[in-house]
Image (tube, helix red, strand yellow):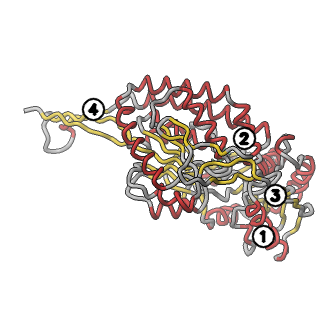
């Protein structure tokens, strides 16, 4: 404590004129771990101006040079994995090993983005006019992808580094400038990641990172006329942003209620392993976590027993010890989770373990015999508590999935590939995984949510395309 981390603008580390800072509370100790600058609206204005200027020059920088710098940043990022992971452990209580994996995965993502960018942006299109009725072959249309301008990137607390670079990489390779607003929990890890880009030697003003209170600069950023694209990952705030944002392309990923549908013929050991991994890794704080199990009654008892046995083996404790279950990110998050648990208890759910909480630490809990009148059947806890709903038909399962306001991913376990495909087709989600828990990665796969889960498709290739616009020049022959 004591030091206030600086924000990054115009290639320099700066102290805000506000004289104020924002505290980052360690979820484990519940004490202030770090402080970051509380930037002002005026400072945001400045950042937008410099980003705009830097972008113009960057768009003219050859693609291969842009790629070269990204490769350099990726390598530096990986070299800095230990101190960045340490921030993740302290700021968001991510288990130590997972924190390291997040940084390594981020380096790989940036390199892949550079590779993919030089391929797909190096290609354009040529159209000739005589395929459309009434035209001679006298018009040649040359189209290519050009940058949008300034991209505003807002990642969430659960992947402050990875979900930041999944926006930064595509934005930069495509020739855009970048303004990053990191989440409060995870801001120091994000600043450290930005430092790696700084060391790689990107031009001044091209990458900027402003920190501060959402109430002061949140709307101001998202409604800023200097912003040409918003890429946001997070919760409900995204819905508010998309209502207020101007006429700019939006990429939004806003959580989910991913269902795990288990049929009678499934490999039940595989099911149990995936329920535990899918529902409880990073204590359930992933938008792609398994958030409801929809299981055929005939196999439910066996699977519940198998999951119980596995949950009993999970370690619960501090992230420094690489515990499987660690404290959830904030006290209010823990209170929200507890609210869902208590509602289910009152309405008669079966608790497979005793409910236990100390501070922000919640022990893993499986809730059996959950019914649709319970909040936990529909709401996302973002914590280590998982409801099981017993079903008597596949249709009942699909009906529950599709009645959700979310539509991110889902998964189905069966050995019958025909049934699996039929269920995948029927599920109104962006992705369906067959015989594995939902997941965003590998990071070049398309990743998209329907309904309240988001707008647009991510994944490296889709994000690069999304952060460009088509520019055409038509040559008219006499
Ligand atoms: O919660 C963010 C979402 O993108 C999850 O990513 O890699 O845990 O599936 P992942």
Q: In the visual, does 57 lie left or right of 25?
A: left
Q: Name the residue under label 1.
A: 339
Q: Mark 4 points at which residue?
A: 126
For the residue labelled by badge 3, is the local secondary structure a helix, a strand or a loop?
Answer: loop
Q: In the visual, does 267 lie left or right of 20?
A: right
In-front residue for pair 447/131 = 447
Q: Which residue is drawn at 77% across and 64% down?
A: 337
Measured Cα–Cα span from mark 3 to mark 4: 58 Å
How busy is the neighbourhood of tag 1: few (under 14 within 10 Å), some, or many (20 plus)?
A: some
Nearest-to-viewer mark from 2 and 1: 2
How busy is the neighbourhood of tag 3: few (under 14 within 10 Å), some, or many (20 plus)?
A: many
Nearest-to-viewer mark from 1 and 3: 3
**Is 411 located above or below residue 389 in the figure?**
above
Measured Cα–Cα span from mark 1 to mark 3: 14 Å
What is the residue that sits farthest to the left in this orientation?
Answer: 478
How busy is the neighbourhood of tag 2: few (under 14 within 10 Å), some, or many (20 plus)?
A: many
Q: Name the residue under label 2.
A: 87
Q: Which of marks 3 and 4 is nearer the N terminus?
A: 4
For the residue labelled by badge 2, is the local secondary structure a helix, a strand or a loop?
Answer: helix
């Amino acid at each position: 404590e004591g030091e206030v981390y600086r924000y990054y603008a115009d290639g320099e580390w700066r102290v805000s004129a506000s004289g104020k800072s924002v505290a980052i509370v360690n979820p484990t100790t519940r004490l202030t771990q770090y402080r970051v600058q509380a930037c002002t609206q005026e400072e945001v204005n400045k950042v937008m101006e410099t980003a705009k200027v830097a972008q113009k020059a960057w768009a003219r920088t050859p693609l291969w040079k842009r790629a070269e710098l990204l490769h350099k940043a990726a390598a530096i990022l990986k070299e800095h994995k230990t101190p960045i992971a340490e921030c993740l452990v302290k700021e968001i209580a991510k288990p130590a090993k997972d924190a390291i994996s997040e940084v390594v995965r981020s380096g790989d993502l940036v390199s892949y983005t550079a590779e993919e960018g030089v391929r797909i942006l190096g290609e354009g299109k040529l159209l000739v006019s005589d395929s459309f009725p009434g035209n001679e072959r006298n018009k040649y249309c040359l189209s290519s992808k050009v940058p949008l301008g300034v991209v505003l990137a807002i990642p969430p607390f659960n992947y402050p580094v990875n979900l930041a670079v999944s926006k930064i990489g595509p934005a930069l390779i495509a020739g855009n400038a970048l303004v990053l607003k990191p989440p409060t929990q995870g801001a120091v890890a994000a600043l450290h990641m930005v430092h790696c880009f700084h060391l790689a030697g990107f031009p001044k003003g091209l990458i900027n990172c402003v920190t501060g209170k959402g109430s002061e600069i949140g709307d101001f950023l998202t409604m800023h006329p200097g912003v040409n694209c918003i890429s946001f990952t997070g919760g409900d705030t995204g819905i508010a942003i998309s209502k207020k944002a101007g006429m700019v392309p939006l990429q939004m990923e806003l959580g989910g209620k991913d269902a795990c549908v288990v049929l009678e013929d499934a490999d039940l050991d595989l099911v149990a392993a995936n329920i535990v991994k899918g529902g409880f890794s990073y204590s359930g704080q992933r938008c792609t976590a398994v958030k409801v199990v929809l299981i055929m009654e005939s196999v439910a008892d066996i699977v519940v027993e198998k999951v119980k046995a596995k949950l009993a083996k999970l370690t619960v404790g501090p992230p420094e010890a690489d515990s499987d279950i660690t404290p959830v990110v904030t006290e209010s998050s823990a209170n929200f989770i507890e609210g869902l648990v208590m509602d289910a208890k009152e309405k008669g759910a079966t608790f497979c373990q005793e409910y236990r909480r100390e501070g922000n630490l919640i022990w893993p809990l499986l809730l059996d015999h959950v019914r649709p009148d319970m909040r936990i059947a529909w709401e996302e806890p973002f914590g280590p508590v998982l409801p099981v709903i017993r079903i008597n038909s596949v249709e009942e399962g699909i009906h529950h999935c599709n009645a959700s306001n979310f539509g991110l991913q889902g998964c189905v376990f069966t050995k019958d590939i025909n049934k699996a495909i039929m269920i995948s087709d029927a599920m109104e989600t962006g992705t369906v995984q067959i015989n594995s828990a939902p997941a965003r990665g590998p990071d070049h796969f398309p990743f998209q949510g329907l309904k309240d889960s988001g707008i647009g498709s991510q994944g490296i290739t889709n994000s690069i395309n999304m952060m460009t616009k088509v520019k055409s020049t038509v040559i008219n022959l006499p």
